[in-house]
Image (cartoon, helix red, strand yellow):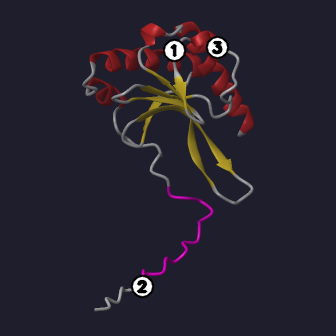
């Protein structure tokens, strides 16, 4: 017996819009309510520390970006490809596994201050820290300040 299989449906290529609809955009949600709802006590405490630090360093009022990112400042980017959008200048998110800091986008993984920070892992533009008690917070503050300034300068 021969079973005929239906040919897979052809995928239609979506034409990329010049301004992509991103989920990561400012919302009217309360930053304080979000932090107070963080279940893990260490993450909640670290979030309050980062909130104060980033307010001081950037001089910006914090905003929720999407459902779980707290951002400070923003910039508009436009790539040669035509893709453009708005993004937070620096920020963080208290995730279950670690605190995610959005600070490497304008600095890069080879940032010299990272050698002095303490234990962390990183992605392309994110820094992952399990606990602020294990890193040098003064170095982290310098990284945040440097990242914020570099981002604002790059995307004027």
For marks 2 and 1 on the same chain, the one whose residue lies earlier in the sequence: 2
Tell me the CA gap for discs 3 and 2: 54 Å
Q: Position of residue 132 (x, y in %)?
A: 44, 12
Asked if residue 106 is positioned above or below residue 118 in the image, the reply reads: below
The quarter of the image holding the C terminus is top right
Q: Which mark is residue 7?
A: 2
Asked if residue 70 is positioned above or below residue 27 in the image, the reply reads: above
For marks 3 and 2 on the same chain, the one whose residue lies earlier in the sequence: 2
Secondary structure state at the residue bearing disc 1: loop
Asked if residue 86 is positioned above or below residue 154 in the image, the reply reads: below
Q: Residue at x 42, y 85 (%)?
A: 7
Q: Residue at x 42, y 80 (%)?
A: 8
Q: Position of residue 30 (x, y in %)?
A: 34, 33
Answer few, some or many: residues within 10 Å of disc 3's Cα (few below 14, many 20 plus, some between 14 and 19): few
Answer few, some or many: residues within 10 Å of disc 1's Cα (few below 14, many 20 plus, some between 14 and 19): some
Q: Kindly indicate whether the residue at mark 1 contacts the one at mark 2 (C-beta within 8 angstroms).
A: no
Q: Position of residue 125 (x, y in %)?
A: 59, 34
Whether residue 20 is in magenta: the answer is yes
Q: In this rendering, would 41 be left or right of 145? A: left
Which span is picked out in magenta? Answer: 7-21
Q: In this rendering, would 6 be left or right of 127? A: left
The single residue placed furthest to the front in the displayed view is: 1
Quick one: 116 or 52, which is closer to the camera?
116
Secondary structure state at the residue bearing disc 2: loop
- Mark 3, residue position: 115
Answer few, some or many: residues within 10 Å of disc 2's Cα (few below 14, many 20 plus, some between 14 and 19): few
Q: Residue at x 44, y 20 (%)?
A: 51
Q: Position of residue 130 (x, y in %)?
A: 42, 19
- Mark 1, residue position: 119
What secondary structure is the stretch in magenta mostly built from? Answer: loop
The quarter of the image holding the N terminus is bottom left
Closer to the eye: label 3 or 2 = 2
């Amino acid at each position: 017996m021969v079973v005929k299989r239906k040919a897979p449906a052809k995928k239609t290529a979506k034409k990329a819009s010049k301004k992509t609809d991103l989920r990561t955009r400012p919302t009217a949600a309360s930053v304080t309510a979000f932090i107070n709802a963080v279940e893990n006590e260490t993450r909640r405490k670290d979030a309050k520390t980062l909130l104060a630090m980033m307010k001081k360093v950037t001089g910006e009022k914090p905003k929720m970006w999407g459902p779980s990112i707290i951002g400070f400042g923003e910039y508009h980017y436009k790539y040669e490809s035509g893709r453009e959008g708005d993004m937070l200048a620096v920020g963080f998110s208290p995730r279950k596994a670690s605190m995610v800091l959005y600070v490497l986008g304008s600095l890069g993984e080879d940032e010299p201050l990272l050698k002095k920070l303490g234990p962390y892992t990183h992605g392309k533009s994110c820094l992952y820290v399990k606990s602020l008690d294990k890193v040098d917070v003064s170095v982290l503050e310098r990284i945040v300040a440097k990242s914020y300034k570099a981002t604002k300068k790059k995307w004027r």
